[in-house]
Amino acid sequence: MIRRRRRPGPSRAALVATSLALSASLVPVGATAQEPQNPAVPAVEPMLPADVAEVVQRLSGTTIRSEIGATVESVRVPAAVRSADVPSRVYRVTIEGRYAPRALPYVMTVDGAAVAVAVPSPDLRSVVALTTDRSVASGRLGLTYGGRLAEESSASALRPPSIRRIRQLPSPGPYDVVRRRYDFGDRAYQPTGLGAKVEVRANVHLPAGLPDGPYPIVLFMHGNHSSCFRGDRAGYRWPCRRGWKPLPNHEGYDYAASRLASYGYIVVSVSANGVNVHGNRLADTGMRQRGELLEHHLDLWQTWSTVGGEPFGDRFVGKVDMSRIGTMGHSRGGEGVVWHVIVDRQRVDPYGIDAVLPLAPVDFTRVTVNRVPLSVVLPYCDGDVFDLQGVHFFDDARYRVPGDPRPKHVLTLFGANHNFFNSVWTPAFGFPGAFDDTFGRCAGKLTPSQQRRVGAAYIVSYFRRYLGEELGLDPVWTGAATPRRIDPSRALMAFMAPDLPGRRLDIDRFTASRSIGRTEAGDDVTASGLSLLAWCANTVEVPCVPGDLSFSDVHLPGLSRGVFGWAGSQGEVHFDLGTATDVRAFDALQFRVAVNPGYRANSGIRYQDLSVSLLDGDGAGVAVPASTGGNEALRFPKGVHRFTGHVILQQVRFPLDVFAGVDLSDVREVVISFDRVEAGVIDVADLAFSAGA
């Protein structure tokens, strides 16, 4: 029989601290929570090269084990594809069950240990794993998804109740919009190392008649999902069988593409079904290959914009601005657009990508990019990428390149799930294979139309700001404001300004243990009245959220931080600026913060609060409570897990004009005071003055 097991809970945290005189309220919570810890993707390498795996998958084998729900076959590898790195025999394990293609890989386990990636079968009635591990012949077989017990998909993932076209959102820009397509077939392009050719197909939204121009170009890329359909049945193979049609996953963003095009953009949504299916045989599911596919589409547009060609003739000659290129990728496509920047920059003559937006992305390779505007969108109730691992793109990029001239953002959308951003993946609004992936106890869950509305608002405004240079949108991307008409959605923005004089002045990055004693400039950090003052590197072995709740920290592993605890209302931390510092060029003082659910001091407190003061050379200062501008960032993380919600360090922002009476040309200290709530523990990172977006 197949048994599916949860992974063991994480170890307890230890902190580098200057003071650990803990009161009873500051003792870490010791609740037992049956939840997995990050990362969601285990280190399971493919046993065979992708092209060999494609051959072996189709061969007959000898059954060596058969039981209810599982079959193990021994398959001889043909001599024609055998090499020093390819064994003569492998094992093919089939586990029965309706497991829909999703963002993360399924993993087959033997006696609780990860052995091989399992791929949904073409008919979506089983998953299949290839391995050389002989333990599959006798060990206890299991199946996990992101470290959790793998659950069979809902019926809607295979047979939705109906198929209806969604109502398009209005196009508020000055241009009428038309849609065009191009399609060079299912086997038109060969990415490196993939083992099979993939389609070159896309939807294009553009201003009707192209009256002006040249227009910026934005490429969209979808993630992993069913690839074919016939009637009300979904399948997962490439190309599709005769009588089946490709599932138009790339059309699922038409609502955002048409809206963006109305502001004077050419928006190209790329089909990636072939990369999804064949990429499963690669360790990272084909991230470089996704980047190569996007680059191939740009090559086509370079030709169409200069000399023309089929199927458009000279329609786009002189109409595409190839010096202003943006990309949006969803799910596996989110990491794909990050890799596209890498692929493009490795060319002798790169195009240069000018804005990147990973939407609900996976992060299988733990790479990131700098010197390009980057905005990561995290749906709080994502049930596919439920650990919100895409936050690492932002976290890892922050200080990676000194002098990075481009901004970075991470946007949290509360009530949003993974699939509703794509209408084709949404039950009753798309096609077979759609399902509602909403994770856990999602408070304030958005309807599909509400989620598309907020998604379109941010996608459109992002490219208008960073490709169109519409500076009036700066408040949205600094977190000072939200787009209009997104109610009832709640959103929180964390913003990191470019590392340039006059744009960002880092006071304390909290990237090293010295941060709780020294600022970035080497001046003093002093504390008084605290019960806990610590620095945490946030490793899997030593997480910042202590005890069995460490799984709730989406930044784990990564994002070191300061940890401040208090019991009473006299706690303060002073950040000395050394000499007179003129901050008049900046807009705000900001930092990222999270209420730490691993400590009892926060139990029963819905919102924490604190005050911030700027002290000038005359000692003048005013304490401004975080709650004055809204302290949603200091809300206790609830609403998803059994004991807690996601721990996400969110931005607290203080516009400098709230510090009335302070000489902003002569600031000497920044003071954080814990004077608003009797007790608590918070995590802090990225304390800085910032300007613009």
Image (cartoon, grey):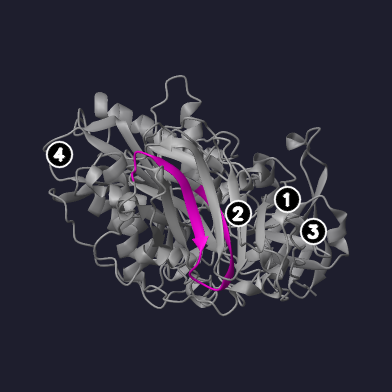
Magenta highlight on residue 664: yes
Tell me how far mark 4 sits from mark 2, CA to CA.
61 Å
The quadrant in which the C terminus is found is top left
* Kind of residue sitting beneath label 2: Ala
Asked if marks 4 and 2 touch (Cβ < 8 Å), the reply is no
Horizontal side of 157 relative to 68 (left or right) equals: left
Sequence-wise first label, 4 or 1:
1
Give the crowd class for mark 3: few <14, some 14-19, many >=20 residues within 10 Å: many
* Kind of residue sitting beneath label 4: Leu
Q: Nearer the viewer, mark 2 or mark 3?
A: 2
Label annotation for residue 297: none
Magenta highlight on residue 50: no
Asked if marks 4 and 3 touch (Cβ < 8 Å), the reply is no
Label annotation for residue 73: 3
Which residue is labeled 4 in the image? 210
Query: Horizontal and vertical percent for residue 692?
Result: 32, 42
